[in-house]
Each structure stands twice: as C-alpha cells, then as structure tokens.
C-alpha cells in the first residue's frame, strides 16, 4: 500500500504543477495586465514616462517581465572604471545627458550602443521613452517626463512556474537580515520569558522567535519555514496570501505585558503586541524603542479577538459537516427502511427541493425565516453576541447538505438490501433493526466514508454564497473577489490551495476507505 | 340430457380439426407486442402527478415564450421617473391608474415592471439551459461512449480530465467571459467549453460497466463493428441513465446562471436573466421583497418541475418498470 500511495502523491504533485501552469497561462497571458493599476495610488500620482517606468517596475515585481534601465547599466560601467568618483566623470555625464535629448542623437553614444548590442543579443527588446518637454525646443521637462532607455524581456509562463515552485518554501537562516551592524548571528535554544518554556530564537533571521509555545491553539508555533502561496497585487497590496487568510481579524486585544527589555523590572503595559512575532527592523530605532527592546527586533503583529478568515470559514464548515453526518446518516437509513412509505416520500421531497432549487434561493429563505421569526442576526458584523452570528450560516450550510447525504445513504442502503447476506441474516432470525443498523448500514457506509476527508478539508475553502449573503469574513469569496479585482497573485494562490486540498482529500478518502473496508486493497500483486 | 348432445347439432366450427405439422409456424414465439417507447409513455402517464406537473410546465413554458412576445419588457422605461422606483404592487398600480397585469408584482430598482421582467428573464434562463444542456449532453455522451470503449483514449482522457477538473470552474468561466464578453452566446460558449467533460466522465464509467458484460463480449466475438456495438449494445442500455442525467443537467444550468450572476460574472446587463434579477433584488430583499421573491420563485419552480419531470421520465425509461 505504501508504494501505491507514494505513486499517487507523485502523480498528484505532477498534476498540481500542470494545473498551476494552465491557470498561469490563463491569467497572465490571456487577461489584460494593466488593470492592476486601476486602484494603485502611486500609479495615479505619477505621470508620463515615470508612470511607464513604474508600470515596468511593478510588472517585474509581479514576475511578468525582466527589464534593465540604461542608467543602471552605464553606472555599473563607469563605477568599474573610476570607482566611487564615477559621477564626476565626463563620460558618465555624457551618457546621462544624451538620454535626455530628443531625437535619435542618443544612438551615437558609445555606451548606448554597447547597451543595445549586449541586451539585444540576450533576447531583450529595447524600449526608448523619449523625454517629454513643454514644447519641442524647451529646456524644461514636463513632470515625470524624464527620458529612459530600457531593455525589456517578457518572461515565459514556464519560467514563472519554475520561479514559483522554487520560492514556494522558504527557510529563514541567520544571514537573512542584510544589516552590517548586526554582527552576532545565531540560531539557538533559549528560555522564553513569555511562555516560561524554551524557544528557538534567531538573530539575523527575519523573525526572532522561530519556534515557540503559547496558549493559543495549536500551542506550538513556528516562523521558520514559510509557504509562499503568492503575493496579492490589488486587494491586499503586497501582502502574502497565506498571511492574509491566517491572520486573525477583529478588534485589538490588549493584555498586560512587559516589553522584552523590561522583563525583570516592574514596568507593565497594556498592549496588544504579540512579542512572539517580532521581526527585524532595518530602519533606525526611536528612543522609546531603544528602551523597550534589547535588540533591533521591534516589529510585532497585534493580537486580535476574532478568528482568521480561514478560521471563520472552517469553524462554520466543520459544525455544518458535523450536523450533516449526525442527521443525514440516520435519516437516510430511516428512509431506506421505510421505503415507499410516507416518511420516504417526505424525505424525497426534501431532497428534491434542495437538489433542484438554486442555492441562493433557499439561503435567502433561511435568512428571511431566521431573522424575522427567531430574531437571529442577519449580517455577521452587526451581531451583538458574536456566537449568534454563526448560527444562520451554519444552518444554511448544513440543512441542504443533510439532504445530499440522505440521498446517497438511501441509495446505497437500497442497493444493499437485496444482497444475499441480508437474506441470510433474516433467515438466521436477526431482528430487522439489527440487520439495518449493523449489517446493511456498515456496507452502505463504505462509499460514504470516501467523501468524509473531502468534506472536512472542503471547509477550508469556505462557502461562496452563504458567506456573501451573511457577510461572513471568511475565505469563500477570496477567488471571486480576486477575479473581479484582477488580483492575479491571489488567483494562482487560490488555485494551488484548492487543487492541493482536492488532491489530498482524494488520497485520504481512498486510504480511509481501505482502512474501513478490509476487502479493498491497493496492492497490485495478484488479480488483474 | 345426453341425447341432446349429438353430432348433428354441434356446429362444424366447434369441432377439433387436424393441424398439419408446420415447421415455419413452430419457430414463431407468441408474446405480447412490446414497443419500448409506447411502454415508456404508458408508464409515465399512469401516474396522475405527472399529468399535473406536465401541465404546470406547459403553462410556464407558454408564459415564458408568449408573455415577452406580447408584452415587451423594457428595463429602462421608467429610468427618468424616479417616483416609480421600488414601488410595492399596490402603490405601483395606484400610480399607474388601476389594476394592470404589468404592475401586479410591483416595480424594481429602476422602475421596471417585475411581472414582465420575470417572464423575459425566465425565457433567457430556459433558452440558456436548453442550449447548454443540448450541446454538453451531445458532446459529452458521444465522447464519453468512445472514451469508455477505447482503452487508448481512456489513458489520455483521464490525464486531461484530472487537470481540467482541478482548474476552478469559476476561474475558467470568468476568464472566458472576460476575454470574449458576457453576451448570451459567449456565455453559452463559456459554459460548454469544459462543461461536457463532467458528463463525459460520468458516461465513461457507465460504459465501462456495460462494455464487458457477456452479451457485449459475445457480440464482439461475432465481429460486430465498434460503432454498432456502441449504438446497439451499449447506448440503449443507458437510456434511463441519459434521461436521469438530463433531469439533473437542465435545472443545474438555471442554478448556475443564478449563481454566476450573484458573484458578478453572469450575463451582461443588456440581457435580462433570472440571475441578474435575483442579484439586483437581494441587495434590499427585506425592504423591497416584491423585487426579490418573484424571480426566486420562478427559478425555484422551473428547476423543481424540470427535475421532477426528468426523474419520472427516467423511471419510465427503465424497462424494469414496464411490467
């Protein structure tokens, strides 16, 4: 079985790569890339050539292309020749000036020719942004009208995929922080003053605490290995998606704590800062910071009282899944037992209703009933008691899901009911109750078991419509909002996340089914 | 009494006669006439509820296709009349002077008639569902049959399937809509470009189950060509499966359109559809319920009727119910 599972995992990873490649092809080459600037303030402030240059910078940052500015090229050339005094050298100033001249005069310059020749040879295309002046002869440039000479190379999708895979996992090392002042670099075990236990602490790493314990689920945390799903372009500008979905939301939660440098003294402060999340501050420290922190690890994230996006979706989903199995299985068995009676017919209508009616329609029916008859909060954020806000979304998810499970359970039960073992059990004199509850349902459960991992992992994806109707701050709308906002980084991240979940749940389902039913074997030995 | 029965009084016809031994005649098997489709409809119409549901569907279809012909729906007719915006049925009729069918369900957020709107929208949704189902079912079943039958194709298609099935469906549709526009026909294209794959996969499994049955094997041994094996041996066996599939597919496109409109990648604003009406109505569904519930009700009614009817027909197409 082990060999089979490894083979499955290998092929799953392979198919994951192909899916990501296909999605990258869709979003990076088939959609208009310039839409990411629609909501960009920096882009709006810039004008003329500076704006174009900013576009190239952003495209390079998001992996669309690679470009080299002539300025950098000529600087490198003259630094090599004159060292630090390059900026007074006539040749350097010549290069600088010639670019700002209108017309083709710049092509006569020696360095420009070298630049063009060098980068054309490497497959780059040369882009010339002519300087923009107030009038043709005028000396003064329009704002942002500086002339540029760039060498631009579009990136192939397959190379993007390669970069993405290469940078998917990153491990912090003690040489991460580029700060010459920091000389004492280490990663070691230390006593953790906050948890009173030990922690792995780094100096020179981006995070100070690499592995630590605290009172929050799952109690052991790490900042050592990071998973880089992708960076948001527009909606959460520049943020890493995995942190967007896992950071807790809500109001700040201040507690009585001590700053790292003040531990041992009796200075206590009310702060929401979580000192386990300290990261290195590359700027200069203020005087208060110098008093509060023994080192340059001063940036902490704040504790909030709400669940993270993914946590909210998962809690709602898992409770709904629990109710789905709690009610769906017995009801399905009951329907099969009372086949063709009024109970079965009522159950069938229940199933038909939720199968055929658009989900949007019945979710609003639940919302209307829940709010007007039971006074439950409608929008998540408006709930006075936070826990009440979870009720309607959970109900809206579980009631239709119960119907779906009932349908399959009934079907599998009925398929089993005419088997020989049932007739035999009946002939042996077993009670109907025993036959149904232990013998038939156990066999009928086998295909049901296959779907359990998928159902639970599926909760991590969230529910698009339910969450949007009740304004739940979950992950359900992540992909659709990303698509609407042309947030390509999030789209790719969502694809990776969803695909991984679906592949993992398929494998887990098979394994669970084989554990549940000893007749199922993945061994290729024997048989056909 | 015995004397009354004599040979002379008995009619000639009633006497036994000798029958010659006819070899040809003895080969004939006498069985009640059986016509498959006649039996299907006999079983289908035996249930009284089917008559009722069928009548309801006919009524809905007539309304969907006739109301828009006689009553032109113009969503922007009252754009300039702000006082007609979001009026309840009673108020809308008062404002327009007495009872009218047009305003019997009130007005929407731009003063549009809800009553005319739901029928025009339902026609769009129905047409969309029918066209998409027709394309997807035809392509899906033909390719699925070949996929299930040919082992070489199976290997290739399984890889293709596992890749395409994992690309988020919403992503694919929205990128397509983004590239080719959100008109009616581009929407049909977006829904059918990969929509057949799921049907095809389902059908492949069904064909796999039947392909190696003994009668099919025997047929192959006797040299029946593959196209005939598929069309004569396998497909008739799957009629009820096809109808069941149709019963779930047809309403699913209506739901799909509603869903996609809700998340903002539906048909364009110029094409009135149920999804768009529901999406517009849900914003203030507690303040102006008359703009929200009618399209929801029509969508729900259409999907339930199509589903129930399809299921009954699927039951009737199963020869085991023809006894």
Image: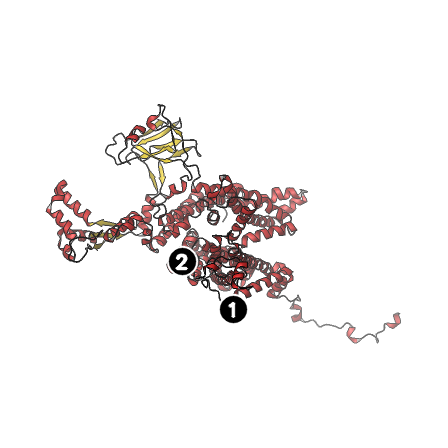
Circle on res. B70: 1
Q: Chain of mark 2?
A: B
Judge from the rendering whether residue B172 lies leftward or rightward of residue B86; answer left or right.
left
Residue designated by label 2: B177
**Mark before the other along the chain sequence, 1 or 2:** 1
Q: Is residue B184 above or below residue A26?
A: below
Q: Badge 1 local density, few (<14 within 10 Å), some, or many (20+)?
A: few
Tag 1–tag 2 contact (CB < 8 Å): no
Please state the total of marks drawn on the protein image.
2
Judge from the rendering whether residue B137 lies leftward or rightward of residue A78; answer left or right.
right
- Of the pair B211 and A437, the residue shown nearer to us: A437
Q: Position of residue B154 (x, y in %)?
A: 45, 55
Camera sees residue A120: yes
Judge from the rendering whether residue A485 lies leftward or rightward of residue B196; answer left or right.
left
- Of the pair A454 and A126, the residue shown nearer to us: A126
Camera sees residue A511: no
Disc 2 secondary structure class? helix
- Of the pair A433 and A194, the residue shown nearer to us: A194
- Of the pair A479 and B160, the residue shown nearer to us: A479
Q: Chain of mark 1?
A: B
Q: Position of residue A468 (x, y in %)?
A: 46, 48
Disc 1 secondary structure class? helix
Q: Position of residue A437 (x, y in %)?
A: 62, 42
């Amino acid at each position: 079985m082990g060999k089979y599972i490894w083979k499955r995992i290998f092929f799953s990873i392979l198919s994951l790569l192909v899916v990501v490649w296909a999605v990258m092809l869709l979003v990076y080459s088939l959609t208009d890339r310039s839409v990411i600037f629609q909501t960009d303030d920096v882009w709006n402030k810039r004008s003329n050539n500076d704006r174009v240059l900013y576009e190239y910078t952003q495209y390079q940052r998001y992996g669309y292309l690679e470009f080299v500015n002539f300025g950098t090229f000529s600087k490198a050339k003259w630094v090599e020749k004159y060292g630090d005094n390059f900026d007074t050298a006539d040749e350097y100033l010549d290069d600088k000036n010639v670019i700002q001249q209108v017309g083709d005069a710049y092509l006569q310059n020696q360095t420009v020719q070298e630049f063009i020749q060098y980068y054309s040879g490497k497959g780059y295309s040369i882009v010339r942004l002519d300087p923009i002046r107030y009038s043709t002869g005028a000396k003064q440039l329009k704002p942002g009208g500086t002339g540029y000479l760039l060498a631009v190379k579009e990136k192939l999708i397959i190379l993007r995929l390669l970069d993405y895979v290469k940078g998917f996992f990153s491990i912090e090392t003690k040489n991460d922080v580029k700060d010459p002042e920091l000389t004492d670099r280490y990663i070691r075990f230390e006593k953790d003053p906050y948890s009173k236990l030990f922690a792995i602490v780094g100096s020179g790493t981006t995070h100070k605490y690499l592995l630590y314990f605290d009172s929050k689920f799952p109690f052991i945390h790490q900042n050592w290995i990071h998973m880089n799903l992708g960076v948001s372009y527009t909606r959460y500008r520049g943020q890493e998606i995995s942190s967007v979905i896992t950071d807790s939301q809500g109001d700040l939660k201040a507690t009585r704590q001590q700053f790292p440098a003040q531990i041992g003294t009796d200075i206590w402060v009310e702060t929401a800062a979580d000192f386990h999340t300290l990261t290195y501050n590359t700027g200069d420290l203020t005087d208060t910071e110098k008093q509060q922190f023994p080192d340059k690890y001063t940036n902490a994230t704040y504790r909030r009282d709400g669940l993270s996006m993914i946590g909210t979706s998962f809690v709602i989903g898992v409770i709904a899944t629990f109710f789905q199995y709690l009610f769906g299985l017995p009801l399905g068995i009951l329907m099969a037992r009372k086949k063709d009676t009024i109970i079965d017919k009522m159950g069938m209508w229940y199933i038909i209703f939720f199968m055929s009616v658009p989900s949007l329609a019945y979710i609003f029916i639940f919302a209307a009933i829940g709010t007007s008859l039971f006074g439950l909060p409608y929008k998540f954020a408006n709930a006075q008691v936070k826990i009440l806000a979870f009720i309607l979304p959970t109900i809206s998810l579980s009631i239709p899901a119960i119907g779906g499970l009932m349908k399959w359970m009934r079907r599998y039960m009925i398929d089993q009911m005419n088997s020989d073992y049932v007739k035999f059990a009946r002939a042996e004199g077993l009670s109907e109750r025993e036959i149904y509850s232990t013998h038939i349902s156990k066999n009928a459960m086998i295909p049901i078991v296959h779907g359990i991992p998928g159902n639970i992992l599926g909760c991590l994806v969230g529910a698009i419509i339910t969450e949007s109707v009740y304004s739940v701050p979950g992950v359900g709308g992540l992909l659709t909002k990303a698509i609407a906002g042309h947030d390509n980084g999030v789209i790719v991240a969502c694809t990776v996340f969803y695909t991984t979940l679906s592949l993992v749940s398929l494998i887990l389902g098979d394994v669970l089914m084989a554990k549940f039913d000893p007749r199922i074997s993945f061994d290729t030995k024997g048989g056909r | 009494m015995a004397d009354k029965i004599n040979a002379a009084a008995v009619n000639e016809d009633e006497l036994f006669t000798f029958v010659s031994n006819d070899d040809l005649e003895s080969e004939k098997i006498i069985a009640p006439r059986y016509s498959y489709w006649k039996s299907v409809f006999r079983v289908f119409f035996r249930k009284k509820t089917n008559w009722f549901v069928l009548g309801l569907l006919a009524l809905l279809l007539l309304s969907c296709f006739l109301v828009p012909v006689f009553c032109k729906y113009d969503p922007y007719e009252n754009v300039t009349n702000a006082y007609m915006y979001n009026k309840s049925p009673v108020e809308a009729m008062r404002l327009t002077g007495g009872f009218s069918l047009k305003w019997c369900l009130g007005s929407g957020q731009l003063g549009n008639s809800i009553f005319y709107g739901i029928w025009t929208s339902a026609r769009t949704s129905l047409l969309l569902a029918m066209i998409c189902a027709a394309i997807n079912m035809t392509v899906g079943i033909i390719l699925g049959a070949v996929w299930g039958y040919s082992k070489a194709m199976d290997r290739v298609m399984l890889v293709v399937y596992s890749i395409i099935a994992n690309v988020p469906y919403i992503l694919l549709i929205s990128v397509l809509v983004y590239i080719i526009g959100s008109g009616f026909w581009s929407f049909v294209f977006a829904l059918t470009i990969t929509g057949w794959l799921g049907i095809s996969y389902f059908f492949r499994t069904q064909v796999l189950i039947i392909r190696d049955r003994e009668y099919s094997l025997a047929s192959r041994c006797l040299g029946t060509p593959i196209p005939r094996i598929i069309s004569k041996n396998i497909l008739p066996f799957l009629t009820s499966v096809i109808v069941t599939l149709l019963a779930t597919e047809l309403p699913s496109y209506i739901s799909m359109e509603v869903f996609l409109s809700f998340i903002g990648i539906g048909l364009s604003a110029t094409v009135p559809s149920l999804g768009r009406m529901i999406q517009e109505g849900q914003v203030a569904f507690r303040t102006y319920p008359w703009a929200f519930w009618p399209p929801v009700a029509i969508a729900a009614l259409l999907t339930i009727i199509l589903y129930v009817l399809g299921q009954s027909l699927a039951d009737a197409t199963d020869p085991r119910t023809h006894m």
